[in-house]
Every structure is written in C-alpha cells, then in structure tokens.
Amino acid sequence: MQKNQIVELEITDLSYEAMGVAHYEGMTIFVNNALPGEIVKAKILKVKKRFAFAKIEKIIKESPDRVNVKLNQWVQTGLASLAHIKYDKQLEFKRNQVVNLLHKAGLDEIKVNQTLASPEETGYRNKAQVPVREVKGQLEIGFFRRHSHDLVPLTNFFTTDPEIDRVLAAVRDILRKYKVPAYDELHHKGEVRYLDVRRSKATGEIMVILVCLHQDFPQIMEVAAEISQIKDVTSLILNHNPKKTNVILGKDDYVVFGEDHITDKIGDVKFRISPKSFFQINSLQTPRLYQLAIDKANLKPSDVVIDAYSGIGTIGLSVAKHVKAVRGMETVKDAVKDANANAKLNGIDNAQYVVGKAEEVMPRWANEGLKTDVIFVDPPRKGLTPEFIKAAVATKPKKVVYISCNPATQVRDLQLFMKQGYSFNEVSPVDMFPQTPHVESVAVLTKD
C-alpha cells in the first residue's frame, strides 16, 4: 500500500476517535468522516506498518445514519468530529465505548445504561479557547486542522454558545482594526496567541481573555475601549504567556477592566469563575450529571463526604445539602480559595476546602479521626494514581463515586478498587460533549 493510492473500502466499525474502520489486504485503514455500512473510494494519506489513514474521495454507498454537514471544517478540525452522525447514533457510539472497554477487562456482567442525552446538541459550550494566527496576511481565529498546526479560519464554532461566537468575531475585528499582530508560532513573535471567552448561562456575563506573548502591547487601551462596548462583555483579562509551549494559558492574569470573575450556576448553587477555574463546559447537562451521581450514591443526611480533585467546589457544594459534611482538597491554591468563597456565597456552612494532594490529605484526616462515608472523585483524563487509590481505601469509605471524562482510565481504576474489596454493578454514560467522541461516565463502588 502506498501514499495517494485510491482504494475501495467497506467501513465495518468506528474507532474510539470516530474514524471509520476498514480492512484491506491485511491492513487496517482508518478513514476520516466515514461511517459503518458505507462503501467508499478513499485516498491513502499515511501508511504505517500495520495500518494506514485515508480520506474519502467518493461515497459509493451512504449510511442512513449520516448527517450531511454544510460546514465540513467542524469535522476536519476535530472540533465536532461526530457532526456527520445522527444524534441517537452518537449516544449509541458513546455507550459502546464503555461496553467495549468493560468487555476487554473481562467485566461483561456490568450493566451499561443508555447514554444520558444532552439538553442541547449544539451551541452548548460555555467557554471557547481559539487560536489566533495570521493566514494569507490577515489575523484570523479558527481551529487547527486535525494532526496539524494549520489554522482553518472559523467564526461559527457549532458546539459553542452562539453568544460566544458573536463575541469572538467582534474581538477578531477589533484586533484587525488596530493591527494587533497575531502570534507567529514558528518564530515565537507577534502578540495575541489565543482568545479565551467564557459566558455564564445563568447571568449572561461574558469574560474575554486575551492570551498574549507580552504583558502589554501598544494598542491595548484602544482595543480594551472597543471590547468594553461589545454587548454583555463584563470583563477583559490579559493573560501573559511568554513561553514557547502548547499550553494555552500563562501563569499571570491582569484585569484590564471589569471584575476578575463571572458568576454561573449549577442547579441552584452559584459559582464564581475566574480565568483559570475549571468549570464544566455544558451548563445545562452538568446539573443532570451531578444529580445522577447523587442519586446513584444514595446519600444519607448523616454522611461525611470527601470531594477529591475538588476544583472550585462544583461537586462538593452541589452535594452539601444532602449530607452532614463535605471536606475537599485541591492542589491549585486559587481553586481552593474560590471553593471556600463559593461555599460562603451560597451560605453553605458544612463544606470546607484545603490545599494539598489527596494522597497526603486523606490519610492525615483519617489519623485525625475523620470518618468518611463517601468519596467523590472527578479526576483529569489520566485518571487516578495507585497512591490515590491506596489512600482512599485507607479512609475506609462505604462508597466511592467515580465521575470520569475518560472511560478507559476509569475502567482501569475500577479494577484496582476491586482488588481492594470494592465492587460495582453498573456504569452510566453521560453525553457532556455532543458532536465529539468524548463521553463522561459515572460508577459507584461499594465495599463488599
């Protein structure tokens, strides 16, 4: 098989990245934007030892599950790589991800519930971080084409709140007007690297963050004056990121105008969100995710709950009214400050947050005599460390509620808990990111 070769393929499956899977002369071929049941003519783009990547040249037989996307850039950039699949089939695809992972782990007896659909299929994201680059001599915003650093100019981001799209386009035009240079990645020069825009669904407040190479730039006051006139924009922050890195945000934030936060809600709990705060992306689905976890945990008014990886307290403060006490920890100092401020903001007096690693804080609390009934965990994609699991088990919780954004690491971690005498009988997938392959899942472990 060679690059640029044209082959006819029958698509038999979807990969976890939602690429069509086909087999040809002993090779596995991954075809972008192809669906099971389709027969396609495809052009080979890249050949490895046992597999290859291809793109569709022509669809000979089309799947009835296909949605014809007008703006194909959403699929090309990976911004919405499931946009060409009917929504009910997206939910099925996400459930199957969890089923397949459990099957590989020899856990076929575990029940996998139907994926909880999102109230909004598009326009659900309350935050956008979009690259700013020069394309054909003009400052553009958009998204990088898959597996590249080629910017595809966009102003309609499909999964993002349309109000955020409106602000992104307006800020882009202001930067063009004042000839603010876009960041040049190759030569590490220019100015604006990213636009980061957050919107509160509850209040309508919009925060604009300019991620810049330098702490200041000559046109900042004129740019700020015009941004302040954009409808619903309540604050402008300059984030200074001088490093040659793929990490989006730098260490330091400077308030140009307005407050250093916006306020949003999950259910009836208010949260102050600062530029670096982690806040769930899908505002309408988040309360349903947390309620599902609370219901599955079957909490009691006498329970003492640990909120590990607590961030700004979103889970713990949502749980607080159902239980006796919530204790949380987080390594990011500002997040802990926000979590305690959010408890105060909501008049919640049974929740307390400290700075520290869960692996170190939980054993200390156990030695101090804290009796833990339930631990809630919502770790990053890499999942839990063996040290965390050991420390969690040592506190002897009756239940561990595991909310995951990566079912692969969740299944791995659930098996480690099983070795420590815990068991679970079901997993509940939740669609927090429609139009993308990502799926959240909830499992409740109980002590045997």
Image (cartoon, rainbow, N blue to C red):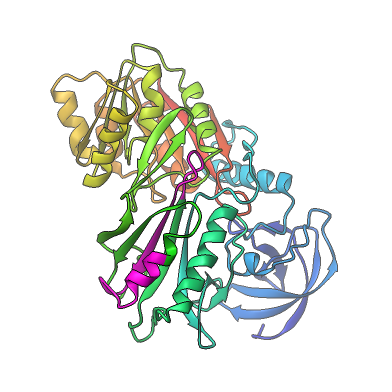
Residue 437 in view, yes or no: no
Q: Give the residues drawn in magenta, as a range.
A: 199-225
Q: In the rendered view, would you say 378 is above or below 398?
A: below
Q: Position of residue 77 (x, y in %)?
A: 58, 68
Picture residue at 62% right of the left edge, 40% below the top: 118
Looking at the image, which is closer to me, 341 or 318? 341
Q: Position of residue 215 (x, y in %)?
A: 25, 70
Picture residue at 50% right of the left edge, 37% below the top: 286
Q: Quadrant of residue 322?
A: top left
Q: Quadrant of residue 192?
A: bottom left
Does residue 220 belong to the magenta stretch? yes
Q: Position of residue 198 (x, y in %)?
A: 45, 52
Q: In the rendered view, would you say 57 is above or below 211?
A: below
Locate the C terminus and report the quarter of the image it occupies.
top left
Does residue 176 belong to the magenta stretch? no
Q: Position of residue 421 (x, y in %)?
A: 37, 26
Picture residue at 67% right of the left edge, 75% below the top: 54
Instruction: Report the number of numbered marks.
Output: 0
Q: Quadrant of residue 120?
A: top right
**Residue 337 shown left or right of residue 174 in the figure:** left
Q: In the rendered view, would you say 365 is above or below 57?
A: above
**Residue 388 shown left or right of residue 132 in the figure:** left
